[in-house]
């Protein structure tokens, strides 16, 4: 789909739409993402002349129109925290304009003298091709050679050199294309239609992935085990040593997107939504109720909590929101590029509902990272770094724990993170999956913050459950048994969450 949008210079609009989709924003970057700037450039060439023609009769009207456009572009989605774009973009733009203006003077020591030397002129010839090649090579090549970005960049320059001499220059200087403008337009349209056809047809075919022998079924193994944790530990170690992906891998790496069932039902709310929906699961007629609250890190445990609630005859109310953590704090949202006020509004409504209904249990889970930082009591943005940040974060968690006073609660700590985007890594290392195994020490983010929050929780009488032994031992493999653990760079697959139900059930309902 990105190829189709790029062909007709509309990829910037597609990326803008994906920007407020939490799961799309968390997915692997498109190898065509860089073409947004080319799309903007071509749209500029289409719209700008029309604007000049419309306003050319009046210089005042032209100046007014240009002023409105410039001021509006600088102000759009712009806040005081925005470093780039915004008015900061004026520096490189004006700097480029000054270099161009200086080059027109033709003085001996001017910019033109420096930029006119042969090495820079040769690189200038290749710059467009290098621009087209560099990002796909960096993104696709990083799957196989993540430790060699400079070699990949150099390789993209060599491809730019080849296409300059074999494609770009021959087409540009072809006599028939130069003779008649109409011929060039027809040729351009034909190539565009060819690109669309290849993208449409090629998108229907997925390259075959090389699999190894089948692996034990994780769900069945844990369900039958007398000691599910011991069996899981053994399976984790076996899977970490495995060289190839199992042929019975589920879900497959080619279609790993498995949103939790309550997400598909519309019960998980996205960035701009603040509604607290009445979504009930588990054993719906039961008298006892458990609430599952938090961000998408709570949501990815939904299958396990739902199964456990049903087995124990509890109602389950699932209330989760994208990137909305439970500590009583206003965070800066890096996707919306502004303070995440919708999170505060939704979170307050969730706690208000808990106070009204007084459930018999609340399960809380959130991402340990605050990404873009958060705001302190004075309204200042606290950068997402340093021990002071951790202490403040734990203090805001304490405020949320106080709101649960008198209600039995469980803090389900953050899940270990895989090595990059797990399905992508596995697809690129199908014959050596050990390359995608991560040491547990590197998989646990914000360990100091994690410990401080756990300390606050225990002091408030809240049980703390560390899920690390469920996907990790000393290492964290992306596949355990026959099951893909992660669907992206941080979230569990629904299949894996359901498979570890016996462990989650024991943690939440230890008395049975």
Image (spheres, grey):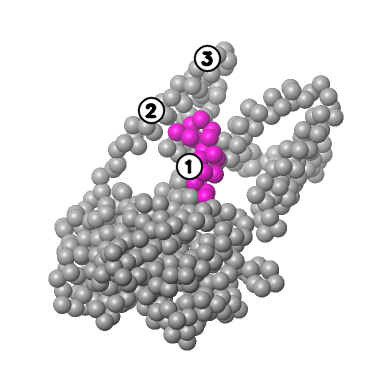
| Label 3: how many Cα within 10 Å (few below 14, some 14–19, many 20+) | few
- Left or right: residue 120 versus residue 184 is right
| Label 2: how many Cα within 10 Å (few below 14, some 14–19, many 20+) | few
Contact flag, marks 1 and 2 (Cβ < 8 Å) = no
The residue located at (78%, 43%) in the rendering is 98
User: What is the CA distance from the residue labelled 1 to the residue labelled 3?
Assistant: 28 Å
**Residue situated in front as seen by the camera: 232 or 347:** 347
Residue 67 at x, y percent in the picture: 78, 38
The residue located at (28%, 80%) in the rendering is 510
Most frequent secondary structure within the magenta stretch: helix
User: What is the CA distance from the residue labelled 1 to the residue labelled 2?
Assistant: 17 Å
Residue 435 lies within the magenta run: no
The residue located at (49%, 35%) in the rendering is 6
Q: Is residue 237 visible?
A: no
For mark 3, what is the residue?
Answer: 183
Q: Helix, strand or loop at disc 2?
A: helix
| Label 1: how many Cα within 10 Å (few below 14, some 14–19, many 20+) | some
Q: Disc 1 or disc 3, which is closer to the eye?
A: 1
Among the two numbered marks 3 and 2 on one chain, the one whose residue lies closer to the N terminus: 3
Q: Helix, strand or loop at disc 1?
A: loop
Q: Quadrant of the C terminus?
A: bottom left
Residue 501 at x, y percent in the picture: 26, 68
Question: Does residue 277 sit above or below 205 in this rendering?
Answer: below
Q: Disc 3 or disc 2, which is closer to the eye?
A: 2
User: What is the CA distance from the residue labelled 3 to the residue labelled 2?
Assistant: 21 Å
**Residue situated in front as seen by the camera: 456 or 162:** 456
Q: Is residue 227 visible?
A: yes
Among the two numbered marks 1 and 3 on one chain, the one whose residue lies closer to the N terminus: 1
For mark 1, what is the residue?
Answer: 32
């Amino acid at each position: 789909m990105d190829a189709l949008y790029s062909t007709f210079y509309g990829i910037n609009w597609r990326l803008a739409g994906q920007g407020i989709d939490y799961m799309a924003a968390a997915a692997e970057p498109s190898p065509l993402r860089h073409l947004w700037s080319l799309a903007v450039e071509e749209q500029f060439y289409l719209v700008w002349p029309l604007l000049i023609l419309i306003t050319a009769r009046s210089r005042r009207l032209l100046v007014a129109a240009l002023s409105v456009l410039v001021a509006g572009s600088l102000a759009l989605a712009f806040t005081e925290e925005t470093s780039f774009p915004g008015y900061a973009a004026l520096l490189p733009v004006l700097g480029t304009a000054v270099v161009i203006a200086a080059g027109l003077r033709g003085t001996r020591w001017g910019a033109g003298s420096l930029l006119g030397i042969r090495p820079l002129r040769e690189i200038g010839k290749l710059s467009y091709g290098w621009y087209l090649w560099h990002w796909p090579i960096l993104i696709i090549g990083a799957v196989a050679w993540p430790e060699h970005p400079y070699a990949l960049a150099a390789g993209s320059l060599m491809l730019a050199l080849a296409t300059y001499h074999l494609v770009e220059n021959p087409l540009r200087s072809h006599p028939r294309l130069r003779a008649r403008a109409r011929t060039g337009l027809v040729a351009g349209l034909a190539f565009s239609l060819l690109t669309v056809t290849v993208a449409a047809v090629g998108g229907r075919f997925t390259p075959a992935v090389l699999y190894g022998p089948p692996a034990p079924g994780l769900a069945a193994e844990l369900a039958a085990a007398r000691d599910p944790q011991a069996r899981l530990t053994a399976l984790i170690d076996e899977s970490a040593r495995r060289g190839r992906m199992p042929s019975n891998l589920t879900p497959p790496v080619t279609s790993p997107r498995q949103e939790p069932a309550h997400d598909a039902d519309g019960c998980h709310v996205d960035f701009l939504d603040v509604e607290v929906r009445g979504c009930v699961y588990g054993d719906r007629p039961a008298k006892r109720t458990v609430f599952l609250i938090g961000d998408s890190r709570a949501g990815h445990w939904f299958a396990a909590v739902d199964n456990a609630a049903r087995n124990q005859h509890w109602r389950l109310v699932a209330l989760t929101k994208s990137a909305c953590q439970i500590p009583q704090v206003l965070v800066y949202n890096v996707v919306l590029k502004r303070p995440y006020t919708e999170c505060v509004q939704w979170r307050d409504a969730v706690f208000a509902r808990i106070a009204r209904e007084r459930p018999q249990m609340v399960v809380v889970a959130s991402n340990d990272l605050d990404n873009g930082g958060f705001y302190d009591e004075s309204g200042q943005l606290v950068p997402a770094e340093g021990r002071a940040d951790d202490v403040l974060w734990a203090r805001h968690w304490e405020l949320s724990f106080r709101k649960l006073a008198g209600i039995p609660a469980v803090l389900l700590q953050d899940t270990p993170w895989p090595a990059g985007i797990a399905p992508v890594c596995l697809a690129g290392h199908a014959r050596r999956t050990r390359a995608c195994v991560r040491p547990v020490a590197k998989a646990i983010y914000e360990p100091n913050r994690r410990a401080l929050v756990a300390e606050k929780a225990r002091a408030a009488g809240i049980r703390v459950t560390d899920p690390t032994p469920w996907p990790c031992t000393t290492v964290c493999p992306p596949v355990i048994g026959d099951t893909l653990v992660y669907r992206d760079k941080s979230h569990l697959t629904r299949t894996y969450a359901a498979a570890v139900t016996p462990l989650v059930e024991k943690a939440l309902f230890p008395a049975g």
